[in-house]
Amino acid sequence: MRGKFALVTKIIFLGITTAILALLTESAFAQKQYVIGTFILVAILALNLVYLTSISIPFKFFLPGILFFFGFVIAPIFFTVQMSGYKYQTGNYLSKSAALEQVLNLGAEPDAAGTTFDITVGKTSSKEDAILVSDIANDKYFLSTATKRTEVPKAAAKFDANGVAIAAPNFQSMTAIALAANDAYSRIHYTYQGKYYIAIESQNAGGVFRQALSYSANTGILSNSVTGATYVDNHRGNFAKVGSPSEILSPGWRAPIWFENYTRLFTDHQIRTPLTRVFIWTFFFALFSVLSTFALGLLLAIALNRKMRGRRVYRSILILPYAMPSIMSILIWAGMFDSDFGAVNSILHTNIHWFQNPSLARSVVLLVNLWLGFPYFYLICSGSLQAIPSELLEAAAIDGANPRQVFRKITLPLLLQILSPLLIASFAFNFNNFNLIYLLTGGGPTQTLNGEIAGATDILISYTYKIAFGSKTFQDFGLASAISVIIFVMVASISMYGLRRSKVMETFG
């Protein structure tokens, strides 16, 4: 499509795309996501440069794919590798400045009497955040900001029905809507007396505290004025007590620990033992899944490769498991093996807890994956059998070879030569078959009472998911990233081997 109409359509489409991306860029920079903002900005410039000029015609076709490749493949890989070198876990999510702010807030101690006041939140006439404090017990009232305290005569204040001051000279109270829209006022330390200050505990109440912890930016030391203890950066994402490095303050921050997450995989017994067990099961699961699905698919392909009545109907039935969404199939199988209401126990008149025994759970996983995978191999084996020259089979039969010899010496070697890249790709897919494990068994059974995270049917990818997201009490994104990098290297190696065997790379060489 060429001409003015095409040009106008292109300009309109680019204008809309540029406007949307510009909004995303502004939002990214506003949230200090500079890498994302820069990438979107580069994408805007590249799109307009390529599609509004004639610099490179082929690049007009490649640019969208290149942008998506960098945005959704390269960037996640880079981020995962980067995070694998950090202490990034529960208690160490924040930046150092944010963690320090929270440590100081948690280092506040209430006064001995636990004094609290009724307060009204608002602003002074100079727009400074302030609270109007009602010390009803002593019949005193004062206005407090972050820098000073100003006494307010009772006669100059206005009160509500409960005797709480709600208005005073040079003070304007804030509405509930305004308070809900901005909570910055709640983080301010309002002046009280001496080392004590008032911290807001709710919109209508404040308590008297003193700051036990103080931080010196010059020395980088945190000091506790009550106990006399000092804390310094341990270069592992926490402030540690001087003389007792095992005592740390929380929360911490994301800190680089370089290759420690990788070394833990081999040196930490609590990580190495389950990881080894999971790796062995993952390898066996992927290998057995490929072999079983290929064998069954090939057997059915050979059986239906001959002329028979109703062959089309049989073929349609065999393809149904492949046509049905795998998520639905997995959930149906999970219901069928339910120990209380499942169809399998009802038919067998048994009460077997399929998912509570490691061996049975693994058997069910392999069975369900066989059901999901054999139609794929049936289809590709059917096509491959038809691609084998019939002259070879006829010649072998003439030379006196029986059907078994023909299959073993001619058919199977040719099939393996044709399908070896697909077999390797299937192995790589099953190596990361997260949906099956997560939906069918959840990785279980797991001995959670012994503190275990890895279950009997967990594969590497589901085990990694549990480390990162599976626990509500402790999550270790750094360690999970390290395992993800190892999985990536293994799967990438398998994929490259498959490409070399299929000689795809030689085509581009």
Image (cartoon, rainbow, N blue to C red):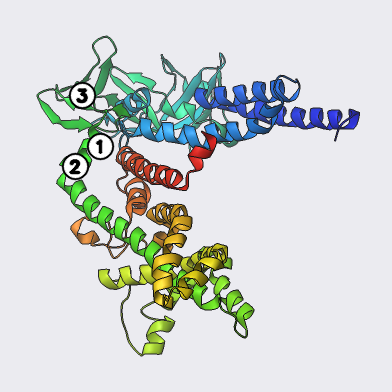
Can you say which quadrant of the picture contains the N terminus?
top right
How far apart are the alpha carbons under marks 1 and 3?
20 Å
The amino acid type, in three-letter code, at marker 2 is Phe
Q: Secondary structure at mark 3?
A: loop
Q: Residue at point 31% right, 62% down?
A: 457
Residue named by callout 1: 262
Residue named by callout 2: 266
Is residue 314 or residue 361 the one in the foreground? 314
How dense is the environment of label 1, judged by Cα within 10 Å: few (below 14), some, or many (20 and up)? Answer: some
Is residue 215 or residue 442 the one in the foreground? 442
In front: label 3 or label 2: 2
How far apart are the alpha carbons under marks 2 and 1?
7 Å
Q: Is residue 271 above or below residue 147?
A: below
Tags 2 and 1 touching, CB below 8 Å = yes
How dense is the environment of label 2, judged by Cα within 10 Å: few (below 14), some, or many (20 and up)? Answer: some
How far apart are the alpha carbons under marks 3 and 2?
24 Å
Q: Secondary structure at mark 2?
A: helix
Does the image show residue 160?
no
Q: Residue at point 30% right, 48% down?
A: 473
Farthest residue to the left: give it: 243
Q: Secondary structure at mark 1?
A: helix
Residue named by callout 3: 234
Q: Is residue 284 above or below residue 93?
A: below
Q: Pick whichever of labels 3 and 2 is earlier in the sequence.
A: 3
- Counting from the top left corner in percent of width and height, residue 414 is at 46, 60
Q: Pick whichever of labels 1 and 3 is earlier in the sequence.
A: 3
Does the image show residue 347?
yes
- Counting from the top left corner in percent of width and height, residue 277 is at 23, 56
